[in-house]
Image (cartoon, grey):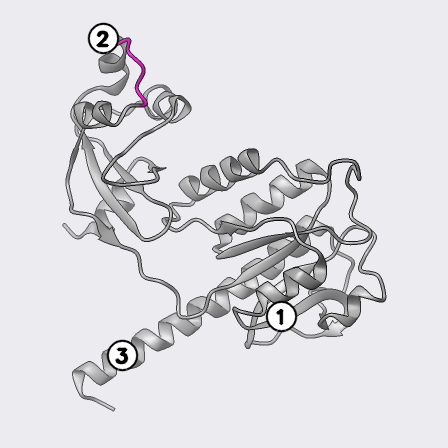
Amino acid sequence: MAPDNHLRQAKSLVFTKDLNLIRLNESTWHHLANVLRIDTGDLIAVSDGDNLYQIFQSLHNLKTALNRNQRRKNEEAEFSAYFTPVTKPQKTEKKERETGIGLSLCKNDKMEWALQKLTEVGVDHIWLILAARSQVKHSDPKPNYPRLQKIIEEAASQARRLRMPLLHELLTPQAAYEEMSRLGRVAMAEPGGKTFAGDLSCVMIGPEGGWTPEELLIADGLELSSGILRVETAATVAGYLLSGIAESVSSESNRKKSTRQSGTG
């Protein structure tokens, strides 16, 4: 059975920093044992969130086995007591074109929802932007990165997304644009802007109050809809469109490689 089939059959995807030293936190152990009810023979996938993943099989009914062992379960040695490898570590293929969304800070629930959906649709990078009209506490605008990273990880697990998007530090619109430009062409979501084009790699999403006239000079405008979209909706739409283009580029590249290898034109 190919690793891809194993991945489809896995009951869960969990993340660890190092596949050679697998450590799961208490909430992950709880989810596997009490929510998913992992049983003897069940498969799970473990990924480092970047380049590697591996398939493991449960050696026990996990809830029963954990109840017998009351020690903390977040040590590396514990994992091998409950799971055995089915495959060797497998490399995840990197996209031909990486995509990114610049998300202006907004209310916590909306920002968290946007990060969740951007992860699910397959965006590779997420930049957080402190725009002039961002709705934040000016005394402490820094986001709660540990919580946001947890939301991304949970969304990646749900979507069986092996490579998690990289969440970047908070930047000004100009600084974010400069970083995003390293991936390719960047546009700013703005009513009345140009239509979506296939050469785009990144889109910057403005705050609820919109970009200021000065900020709109940073990049070309991009119209995502004939209506006015909420920040989280605009981010999801842009992320979905970008990911679709990136997948098409990767598919075409793989087709050309296959054609060259087979010697057909």
The quadrant in which the C terminus is found is bottom left
Q: Residue at x 50, y 49 (%)?
A: 119
Which residue is the site of mark 2? 68
Q: Residue at x 61, y 61 (%)?
A: 238
Calculate the distance from the C-alpha at mark 1 to the C-alpha at mark 3: 28 Å
Q: Amino acid at mark 3?
A: Lys
Tags 3 and 2 in contact by the CB under 8 Å rule? no
Calculate the distance from the C-alpha at mark 2 to the C-alpha at mark 1: 55 Å
Of 190 and 138, nearer the camera is: 138
Vertical comparison of 62 with 138: above or below: above
Question: In the figure, residue 188 lies in which quadrant?
Answer: bottom right
Question: Between tags 2 and 1, which lies in front?
Answer: 1
Whether the magenta-drawn stretch holds residue 248 is answered as no
Q: Range of the magenta residues? A: 70-74
**Residue 251 drawn at (x, y percent):** 36, 71
Q: Crowdedness of circle 3 by 10 Å Cα count: few (<14), some, many (20+)?
A: few
| First in residue order: circle 2 vs circle 1 | 2
Of 43 and 80, nearer the camera is: 80
Give the overall secondary structure of the magenta segment: loop
Q: Residue at x 21, y 89 (%)?
A: 264
Q: Crowdedness of circle 1 by 10 Å Cα count: few (<14), some, many (20+)?
A: many
Question: In the figure, residue 62 lies in which quadrant?
Answer: top left
Question: Between tags 1 and 3, which lies in front?
Answer: 1
Callout 3: SS: helix
Which residue is the site of mark 3? 257
Which residue is the site of mark 1? 186
| First in residue order: circle 3 vs circle 2 | 2
Q: Amino acid at mark 1?
A: Val
- Residue projecting furthest to the bottom: 265
